[in-house]
Image (spheres, grey):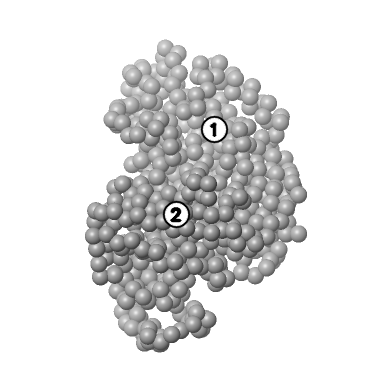
Amino acid sequence: MKCPTGDKLSQYVDDRLAHDDVAMHVHNCTQCQQVVATFEREQQFIKETLQTPTLPDDFTTIVLNQLEPYERQVKRKKLAPWKRVLFAAAGVVLALGVSATLNPSFAEWIGGLFSTEQVDDGLKMAMEAGLTERVNLEVVDNGMTLKVEDVLADSSRVAVSYQILNRDGEPQDADLRWGESGNEIIVIDQNGTELSQMGVGWQQGTDYGLIEIPLNDKESLEKMIVKFDLAELGGVKGSWKLEVPIDLTKKRNLTTTVSLQGAKTSQQGVVVKMKEVQYAPSSTKLFYETGFTKEEQASLTKDIQKLESQFGIKYDRFRNPFESYKTDIQYHIENGDGKVIASNNAFTEGKGHPIDVGLLDGSNNDTGQMGQLAVTRSFIPQKEDDKLTFVLDGIFKTVPSDFSIKIKPEELKKNPLTFDYEGNYMTIKKVEKQRENVYSRSSTPVEPKMVWGIEMEGGIEVPASRLETWILTDDKGNSYPTVNNWSILDEKDKNGRYKTTIHLAVPDLDEEPEELTLHLVSVTRYEEIEDVWAVPLYK
């Protein structure tokens, strides 16, 4: 199955329970998990920004009265004294859309999207370093204009700002409805190969949208073209085709690479090997690998063979209940003063699951060996040269479990079944047929069908083990893989645990058995590091 569109993943983040089809894919796709994590960080950013105190009604007038007239030629360096004031005004653009009521050239006058608070600090720092190119490419049809204003590029990522303008030149909502209404955006390299990673973002009520292309493992990339092929813009049908060429050949000189000399540690059956760190103007990028030790790998192989024999389910690349055994790590990056500037998989008060702090994006690439991943993480660079240090805090590993529980569906209607396992306190509420959105292997939607589903709800402690993969067996000894769609809220129940729901879909089950058994065949456990392991990220 192909990865869902960015719009689909965004909708999934907004309402997980309404998108079981996407959840099935995200559960087993590390790349989409990173996209979802990025959307969650953006969602939190918007939520926090919208809490900005309300400014007075005449705030815009006060600011404009202090600025020189537009007709006067102003060199960019003269904007420096206004930088703090204009950034504050940009916060108003984000929260209230003030600039939409002004002359459209106002946003351009202050430096475009990359000079505002709508982008991360890394992009703003790269803009201040002079890496922004004003391209002003546009295409018009039926009174609507797609305008690409700025391109910002270095060796770590490319960012493109755009606007949607009506026939009066007024900015409209910047939602391109990517992947819908026949709208397509692709990125190709100098060889004509399409790049798989790209994000499109916008914030409702603002003037700009942002297209971002991470350049993870793209050392040989010299040039690219962002191609727009849109059939609808701002609710108007038409045709908008635009190509934006981007040259990266001179950007490589702006990046400093520090080898980490293969620094390596083994913790609780997990190997962590550091590769290198790249310092670019818009981001700092860390490369490392995680995997199981040889001993853990051998043990897992034996356990999987036992499970395959027990349940009679063999490997299938499209639905493999035994493919989820993997590794991950928890760590933080600290500066020379010991201040934490970024965290990966951090446990934070008010959150029922690990989150990333200060990270921009990342990717996990399967190396072909069970549990081994080549990982890239990008975080916001520091404004001043600093000696950064990687500090390992803990490890996550998904391993076999021998937990099982018997269920009599008819009895659940009167007496829901409760169990607790490794910090999870769950109640099985019902077993019933439910409508499922099913996708073919080509990602083409097909007719929804009714499948059996098992509903659980309860609460979890932090850190609790994550209940990953379940297999159902009926009273005749038949085995059925399940698809696990789980949700953890940032809200606690009366017992102080984070509210949790689990929906298990059983696509291959035709009839409700009188008795069934749920077998938990994989669980992700967190283990804290006892001894500090730190790696300097500098020469």
Between marks 2 and 1 in the image, the one whose residue lies nearer the viewer:
2
State the image coordinates of residue 29 (x, y, percent, origin top left): 49, 38
| Residue at 45% in and 73% down | 111
Seen in the picture, residue 406 relative to 539 is either above or below; the reply is above
- Nearest the eye: 19 or 218: 218
Classify 10 Å Cα crowding around label 2: few (below 14), some (14-19), many (20 and above). Answer: some
| Crowd band around label 1 with a 10 angstrom C-alpha radius: few (<14), some (14–19), many (20+) | many
Q: Foreground: 179 or 309?
A: 179
Name the residue rendered at 35%, 66% in the picture: 207
Q: Name the secondary structure under disc 2.
A: strand
Q: Is residue 91 visible?
A: yes
Q: Residue at x 68, y 30 (%)?
A: 296
How many marks the image carries: the answer is 2
Q: CA distance from mark 2 to mark 1?
A: 35 Å
Which residue is label 2 attached to?
A: 226
Q: What residue is disc 1 on?
A: 324
Could one spot residue 458 in this view of the protein? no
> Amino acid under label 1?
Ser
Name the image quarter holding residue 174. bottom left
Comes first in the chain, label 2 or label 1: 2
Q: Which mark is residue 28?
A: none
In this view, the residue in front, 30 or 68, is 68
Q: Is residue 37 above or below residue 62?
A: above
Q: Secondary structure at mark 1?
A: loop
